[in-house]
Image: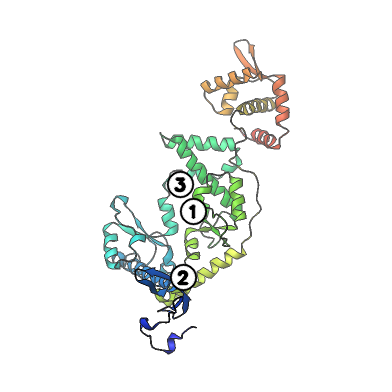
């Protein structure tokens, strides 16, 4: 039984229908089971969970819109302080502390307080409104510090070993301590860049405006279809996996890439229910139009062809560095048409120190893979018959053959 609230006077809540198992909501006047109501000390609340959520959303978004409109006497004209995102996209607006030392409160825990009180505190703490895309970039300190190497244009043209070496050298130049930890973080950003490039054409599928080059930190992954029986992936968890595994998970769970703004709007269910009551008609229509565009772009999207190669997977595993060394010697021999090389040429090719070179030579000698040939006052390195046999076997694997081919094309 559903009562038509428009054609009757609002009755006293004590007279609402209640048979001990089902009761009438005091707001929507629909009769629902007890499970659809939140409990309180002396029983159940008078309005259902759905109406309660709408009421909470209404209060929160009204407070946010009033602060956003009036903060610093309307200085930002109801727009993100860093871009042209306006109040039409209210759910995407965050309140950012420019000086973290001044931060005493946050919006999420105080969104139901009187808006003027909150606004005055925000002004005192030098808070500015930022859309979530701008906020993501603002807070990505590690990304900004290493942006140059993360977005290096030709990065994926190198071998995995070279990529790791390039990143390692770059990090060591930028930081004096904990270089290894910083390197891992940079590698995680590079993974994210590669996955979005390969699967999603480098950009947000919703708006198409945000891409890896103008705001990689803002790009996120959204599940197109809901499934209760899957453990939804989070980038904070999967970024430690190998690229192939990450890609397989994204495909298997039917994910698309969205910028933080589009992702927030897609999940802003309660805002969509109250938008006409929160915003003026022109802003409300703008929101609805943009939301439809996001949905259309998501459902029209088709995954690009996937290259199965993982650019960060190191070819030479722990304990197999000798393979790399004899292949490099073999490469120099092919380039120079000789069977003996000066040690310094191997050192330059590997970009290692003299001390490291000595360890490499000692290692290869112990394995009977090279011989030291003296010619006057100079010493040369020559591969043994055992090494040549090993090289022939190694090159049967297409990964190593490709590595050698790439090495011949460019100086490594």
Residue 173, picture quadrant: top left
Residue 50 locus on image (x, y percent)? 45, 72
Residue contact at pointers 3 and 1, CB within 8 angstroms: no
The local secondary structure at tag 3 comes to helix
Up the image or down, 145 lies above or below 364; here it is below
- Mark 2 or mark 3: which is in front? 2
Q: Residue furthest top?
A: 376
Residue contact at pointers 2 and 1, CB within 8 angstroms: no
Q: Which residue is mark 2?
A: 35
CA–CA distance in space, label 2 to label 1? 47 Å
Q: Going from the N terminus, do you reach mark 2 or mark 1 first?
A: 2
- Left or right: 131 in relation to 299: left
Residue 106 locus on image (x, y percent)? 33, 58
Residue contact at pointers 2 and 3, CB within 8 angstroms: no
Residue 49 locus on image (x, y percent)? 43, 71
CA–CA distance in space, label 2 to label 3? 46 Å
Up the image or down, 80 lies above or below 17; here it is above
Residue 270 locus on image (x, y percent)? 45, 69
- Residue 398 in sight from this viewpoint: yes
Which residue appears at 58% of the width and 18% of the height? Answer: 362
Up the image or down, 105 lies above or below 153; here it is below
- Mark 3 or mark 1: which is in front? 3
């Amino acid at each position: 039984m559903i009562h038509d609230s428009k054609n009757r006077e609002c009755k006293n809540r004590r007279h609402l229908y209640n048979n001990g198992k089902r009761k009438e909501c005091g707001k929507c006047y629909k009769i629902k089971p007890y499970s659809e109501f939140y409990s309180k000390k002396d029983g159940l609340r008078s309005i259902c969970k759905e109406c309660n959520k709408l009421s909470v959303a209404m209060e929160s978004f009204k407070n946010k819109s009033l602060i956003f409109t009036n903060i610093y006497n309307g200085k930002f004209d109801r727009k993100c302080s860093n871009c042209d995102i306006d109040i039409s996209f209210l759910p995407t607006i965050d309140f950012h502390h420019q000086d973290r030392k001044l931060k005493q409160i946050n919006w999420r825990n105080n969104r139901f307080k009187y808006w003027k009180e909150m606004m005055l505190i925000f002004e005192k703490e030098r808070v500015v409104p930022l859309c979530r895309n701008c906020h993501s970039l603002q807070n990505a300190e590690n990304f900004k510090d290493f942006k140059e190497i993360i977005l290096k244009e030709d990065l994926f043209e190198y071998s995995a070993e070279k990529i790791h070496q390039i990143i390692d050298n770059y990090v060591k130049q930028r930081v004096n301590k904990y270089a290894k930890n910083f390197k891992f973080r940079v590698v995680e950003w590079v993974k994210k860049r590669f996955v979005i490039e390969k699967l999603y054409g480098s950009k947000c599928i919703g708006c198409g405006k945000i891409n890896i080059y103008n705001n990689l930190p803002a790009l996120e992954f959204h599940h197109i279809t809901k499934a209760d029986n899957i453990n939804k992936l989070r980038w904070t968890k999967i970024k430690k996996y190998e690229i192939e595994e990450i890609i397989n998970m994204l495909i298997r769970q039917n994910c698309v890439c969205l910028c933080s703004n589009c992702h927030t709007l897609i999940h802003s269910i309660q805002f969509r229910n109250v938008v006409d009551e929160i915003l003026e008609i022109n802003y409300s229509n703008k929101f609805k139009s943009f939301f439809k565009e996001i949905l259309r772009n998501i459902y029209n999207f088709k995954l690009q062809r996937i290259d199965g190669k993982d650019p960060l997977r190191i070819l030479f595993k722990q304990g197999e560095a000798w393979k790399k060394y004899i292949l490099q010697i073999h490469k120099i021999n092919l380039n120079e048409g000789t069977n003996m090389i000066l040690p310094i040429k191997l050192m330059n090719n590997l970009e290692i120190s003299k001390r490291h070179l000595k360890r490499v030579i000692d290692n290869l000698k112990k394995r009977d893979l090279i011989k030291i040939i003296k010619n006057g006052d100079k010493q040369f390195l020559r591969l043994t018959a055992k090494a040549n046999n090993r090289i022939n076997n190694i090159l049967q694997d297409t990964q190593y053959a490709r590595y050698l081919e790439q090495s011949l094309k460019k100086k490594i």
